[in-house]
Image (cartoon, rainbow, N blue to C red):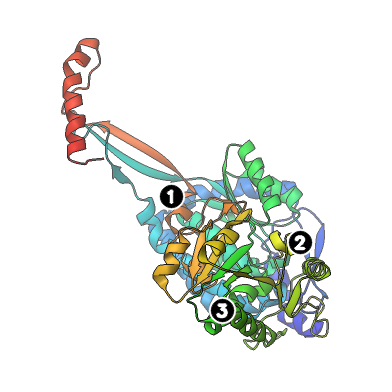
Amino acid sequence: MSPNTLAALVGARRRDALVAQLSLTSSDTATVIAPFTGQPLHELPLSSISDVQDAAASARQAQRAWKSAGFAHRRRVLLRAHDLLLERREELLDLLQTESGKTRGQAFEEIFQAATVTRYYALSAQRVLSTKRRRAGIPLLMSTRVSYSPKQLIGVVTPWNYPIALGTMDIVPALAAGSAVIQKIDNQGALSMLATREAYIDAGVPAEVWPIVTGPGSKVGNAVIDSCDYVCFTGSTPTGTKVGERAAGRLIGASLELGGKNPLLVLADADPARAAADAVYACYASMGQLCVSIERIYVHESIATEFTREFATRVTDLNQTAALDFSGDVGSLTSAAQLERVQQHVDDALAKGAIVHAGGYARPEIGPYFFAPTVLSNVTEDMQCYANETFGPVVAIATVASDAEAIDRANDSDFGLNASIFSGSIAHARRLADRLDAGSVNINEGYRGSFSSVDAPMGGMKSSGLGRRNGPEGILRFVQSRTVSQSNGILQLPRTGAEWAAMAGIMITLLSVLKFLRQR
C-alpha cells in the first residue's frame, strides 16, 4: 500500500477535525508512523501537564450534571452511541488498520466489542447500581440499605494494540455509572480513539465529561493518575506496577490489565486437525499483539506429531497482507520496536537450539514491519521467549505425557491472564480449567469466548494484573458504596448496663434461632 493511499484514507482535513477535540496549550508534536508503509501518517499534538490539570478540573465540573441526568438519560445516550459506532464502522475500521497494521477482521473485533460493551452497560448500570436492601444485624429491629455514588473522575490509560476495544471496556462503564473520564491515549491509536469518542459526543455525552490527552506516560500519564479518583491501565507489567504504586500513594484504587504468557493445552482426546485450525487464530490474531493471545502450546504426546504438522501447515498457509479488506488472515506488526523484539526472540531461540516449523523471518517485501507467523519447538528455559512475553507472532509447542504435566507447565509462569483447553470432552476440560492459574479460561477457543463475555469479569492473576473489567465487577470499580441503617422503633436497643442485663439473654436466643433457620 502506498503512502498516498493512506493519506487518502486519513486526509488532512479529517485528521485535523479529529485532533481538534484535544484542548492543548503545548506546541509539541509526535510523528505517528503507518505500520503498513513505515511512512509518517501524521503529526500528533501532545498535551502538557497543565492541559491535563485543566481537563481534569473541567471534567469534574461537568460530571455533576452528567450524574444528575440519571440512569435513563445515560442509557439513551449510550444506546445512541452504540448505533453510531455501527453506522461509522467503515471509517473506524480504516483508521484501526492504518494505525495498527492489523487485518480488517481483527479490527472488526474491536468495533464489535465496543458496541457490545456499550449496550451491556447502558442496559445494566441501573440494575447493578440501584439501592438494595441488605440483611440487618438485628432483623426486624433494624433495616439496612446499600447505595452507590459514582467516583467523580476516572483516569483511563489505553494502549496502542486494541485502542477502541480496551478503551471502551473501561470508559463506558464509568460513563454509565455517572462518572467523568480523563483518558490518556497512545499516540499510535490516537485517531481511532478520537473518532470513537466523537461518536459518543455526537450521541449526547458532554465533551467535557470525557476529555482526551496525549503524550508520554512518564509525564502526561502520571499527571492523569495524580488528577483522578481511580485509574485504569492496560499495558506492560513493569509499567503497570509503577501505575499501581503511584495510585496507592494517593490512596486511590486501580485496575491493571498487564502482560501474559498464555498457555493452550491440547488434550489427548482432542481432534488434532480441528484443534490446530482453531489454535492458529488464538495465537496470531493481531500478530500476537494482544494480551490474551496464546504464546505456549502443550500438546499430549499421543497426538503431538499430527497436531504440530497440521498447525505448522495452516500457519504457513496464512495470507499475510496490507489489504484494507477482509482478504488478509494476518497483518503487520505495529512498530519497528515490535519487529526488533520479535526478531530478537526468534534469533535467540534459534541460536540456542530451537526448531522452526514455520516462519522465523521478516517479510519486508510486504512492508517494513511484517514478520512471518512463527512456530517453534524445543524451546528451553535459557531462551528469551521461554518465559518472557514476546507480544508477537511467535508460538512454542511442547509435548507432555499427561494432563497433570500440562497443568503444571501451564501454571509454571509469573503470568496468569488467559489460558485455553482443547478437548473432545467439555466436562473433562472444565475440570482442568479449575486447576489453571488464569483469570480467564477458554474451552475449544483461544480467547474470544471470555473476551466477548462482557457480563463476566476479565482480569489477571499473579503478574498479569489487578482488579477486573466487564460484568458487574467492571462498573462497581467506579462507585463508592454507602451503607444506611435505621432503627425501626420496634424495640429499644440496650444503652445502660441494666438494659444490657435484661436483653443479653434475648439476643443470645435470637442468634441461636437465626442459626437454626439458616439465616445469614
Label 3: few (<14), some or many (≥20) within 10 Å?
A: some
CB within 8 Å, label 3 to label 1: no
Q: Nearer the viewer, residue 102 or 387?
A: 387
Is any atom of residue 257 visible in this view? no
User: First in sequence: mark 3 or mark 1?
Assistant: 1
Point out the frontmost of discs 1 and 2. Answer: 2
Q: Nearer the viewer, residue 88 or 411?
A: 411
Residue position marked by numbered label 1 in the rendering: 68
Q: Earlier in the sequence, mark 2 or mark 3?
A: 3
Query: Up-down: is 501 above or below 239?
Result: above
Tell me the quarter of the image containing the C terminus: top left
Type of amino acid under label 2:
Gln
The residues bearing labels 1 and 2 have C-alpha atoms spaced at a distance of 53 Å
Q: Is residue 144 above or below residue 254?
A: above
| Residue 25 position in % (x across, y down) | 76, 53
Name the residue: 70% across, 51% down: 239
Looking at the rendered structure, the kind of residue marked 1 is Ser
- Evaluate whether residue 184 shows in this view: yes
Element at badge 3? Answer: loop
Q: How far across and down, in percent of the image, does residue 356 sit?
A: 75, 77
Q: Residue furthest top?
A: 498
In the picture of the structure, the residue carrying the numbered disc 2 is 384
Sequence-wise, the earlier of marks 1 and 2 is 1
Which residue in the structure is indicated by mark 3?
Answer: 303
Task: Give the number of the mark in front: 3 or 1.
Answer: 3
Give x and y (percent) for residue 432.
46, 63
Spatial CA distance of label 2 from label 3 is 27 Å
Q: Who's the residue at 45% across and 77% down the image?
A: 424
Q: Secondary structure at mark 1?
A: helix
